Amino acid sequence: MCSAVADDDPEVHRIEFEVPWPPWTAYAYLVASDEPILVDAGAPGEDGWEALLDGLESAGYAPEDVEHLLVTHPHTDHDGQVATLLEAADPTLYVPEGVPERLSRDPADLAAVVRANAVEAGHPNPDAAVERSVDSLRRNADCLPPEAVDVVVADGDSFEAGGVTFEAVHVPGHQVNQVAFRAGERLFAGDALIEPFRPAALHVGYDRGCFDCVDAFYDGLVRLDGLEVARVFPGHGPVFSDVAGAVERTRRDLDALVDDCHLTLERLGESSPYALTETRVEDPRRIDFSVFESMGALARLERHGLVTSARQDGVRVYRTA
Ligand SMILES: [Zn+2]
């Protein structure tokens, strides 16, 4: 299935992309209108382009028909075809505030910040963290050329695209700049709310602000709580309607993460975020991503007076208070 009318909303067509990590699929949405609107642009590479073509075609469109392109956040499973689409068509490109600056970042500055923060987290191989971050910056800037951005949208901004009024809701935590786009009864949530699971709190990776990812995620949920919409169109997983239920589940999952970090630290006595993650997470492939969540959870516990920390030889070591 490449595209389908999204759960009895005849104007929204869902376009499916394969991605090489769980949950294995990502979604973009074509909103039918005299000036068709695409929300997110799928996965990169030729397979992504084929999926986009197929999805647009089964909705009755070609790439050059897309007149407005809204991007929820600069991850390659959502911005993967922005540059390719801009070669084929001339849509107005809307991105969240901060994205052009983030994607224009000097790689040497990013490398220096990531190295210092990876050391502080207790990473055993800071070079690997630096390489991964710089590579991710390069891939995302290739997919979403910052100089191509037409409109920057900030939290609370209302704007009109293709006859539809959108409101941007800043939902950091998964990615620091992420916005969800509300259009009347519809919410295009990006990776802020997904029904079967909580999106990872990646936020900035090891960049500046890496200890804030969990607090930021909670802040975004406050903005989503109480939104009255009929349908949520997420970046992964099924279309759903129960916003309050998804917010509550996501918040409970964050609470469980923070509790787990607290209990693990009590057992260990003292720990760096990285060592704590090695204890907490069984699958070694998940450690490099889960460490951001440990950093955010430990920093939150410290702000609440439940743990303390001190730097030892550059590594931040936490203890229960
Ligand atoms: Zn995603």
Image (cartoon, rainbow, N blue to C red):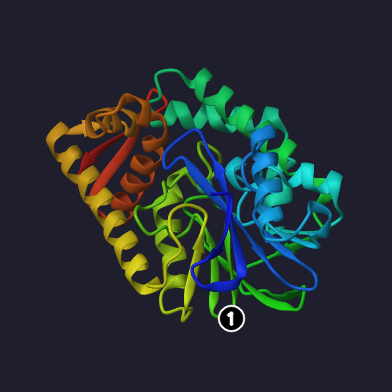
Q: How many marks?
A: 1
Residue 104 position within the rendered picture, expressed as x and y whole percent measured from the top left: 75, 41
Q: Secondary structure at mark 1?
A: loop
Residue for badge 1: 184
Report whether 261 appears left or right of 292.
left
Quarter assignment of residue 221: bottom left
The amino acid marked with disc number 1 is Gly
In the rendered image, is residue 31 in sight? yes
How crowded is the residue under tag 1: few (<14 C-alpha within 10 Å), some, or many (20+)?
some
Residue 292 position within the rendered picture, expressed as x and y whole percent measured from the top left: 41, 39
In the rendered image, is residue 98 in sight? no
Report whether 281 appears left or right of 132.
left
Q: Is residue 102 above or below residue 317?
A: below
Residue 19 position within the rendered picture, expressed as x and y whole percent measured from the top left: 52, 38
**Residue lying at 51% horizontally and 72% vertically, measured from the top left:** 8
Q: Is residue 253 above or below residue 315?
A: below
**Residue lying at 31% horizontally and 55% vertically, measured from the top left:** 254
**Residue lying at 26% horizontally and 33% vertically, measured from the top left:** 281
Residue nearest the observer in this picture, 31 or 189: 31
Residue nearest the observer in this picture, 105 or 272: 105
Report whether 74 appears left or right of 119.
right
